[in-house]
Amino acid sequence: MIAFVLQSAPTATGGSSTGIVAYLTIFVLAAFVGIEVVSKVPSILHTPLMSGSNAIHGIVLVGALTIMGEAHGTAEVTLGFLAVFLATLNVVGGFVVTDRMLEMFKSKPGDRARGQAAKAEDAGGSGPSGSSGASGSSGSPGGAA
């Protein structure tokens, strides 16, 4: 039954045209596959995949600009402008999201200074319970007499 509905109907020129049902079926299947693939991506791989998709969306923007350059008529120019606008939003939004995700992995300047101070304190042994002498041999029971 589905194969019958998705069969292409012959046209007057002898060729075949794909019906709207076939396009909708492909769109729905692609949406389901996309949801499954994206939901299975581990969070550690999300940032590199976003960078890759930003590159692909840049290519989409170049294609939209090319199509808009070939447009003749008000409807074509309007659709071309809309395509360029949406592709630009997609590219800029992708870079903003990627930048925010990369900011999560950077340490803040205050955290770095506190971490270095803690390392210096541990290495120096200063403090109320630290060693009292530089050589460590004075007053020790095992020292040379």
Image (tube, rainbow, N blue to C red):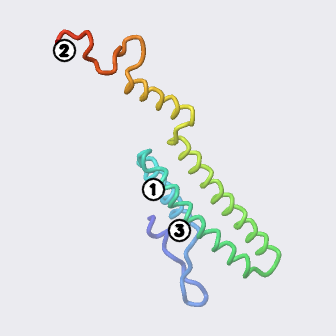
Instruction: Give the residue type at disc 2.
Output: Gly
**Which badge, 3 or 1, comes first in the chain's sequence?**
3
Which mark lies nearer to you, 3 or 2?
2
Marks 3 and 2 in Cβ contact (< 8 Å): no
Circle 2 Cα neighbour tier, 10 Å, few/some/many (<14 / 14–19 / ≥20): few
| Horizontal arrangement in the rendering, residue 88 relative to residue 73 (left or right) | left
List the residue tagged with mark 3. 22
In space, the residues marked 3 and 2 are separated at their CA atoms by 91 Å
In space, the residues marked 3 and 1 are separated at their CA atoms by 16 Å
Which mark lies nearer to you, 2 or 1?
2
Q: Please give the count of numbered marks on the rendered protein.
A: 3
- The image's mark for residue 7 is none
Instruction: Give the residue type at disc 1.
Output: Val
Secondary structure type for disc 2: loop
- Compared with 68, 32 (above or below) is above
Instruction: Give the residue type at disc 3.
Output: Ala
Secondary structure type for disc 3: helix
**Which badge, 2 or 1, comes first in the chain's sequence?**
1
List the residue tagged with mark 1. 33
- The image's mark for residue 143 is 2
Circle 1 Cα neighbour tier, 10 Å, few/some/many (<14 / 14–19 / ≥20): few
| Horizontal arrangement in the rendering, residue 95 relative to residue 144 (left or right) | right
**Which badge, 3 or 2, comes first in the chain's sequence?**
3
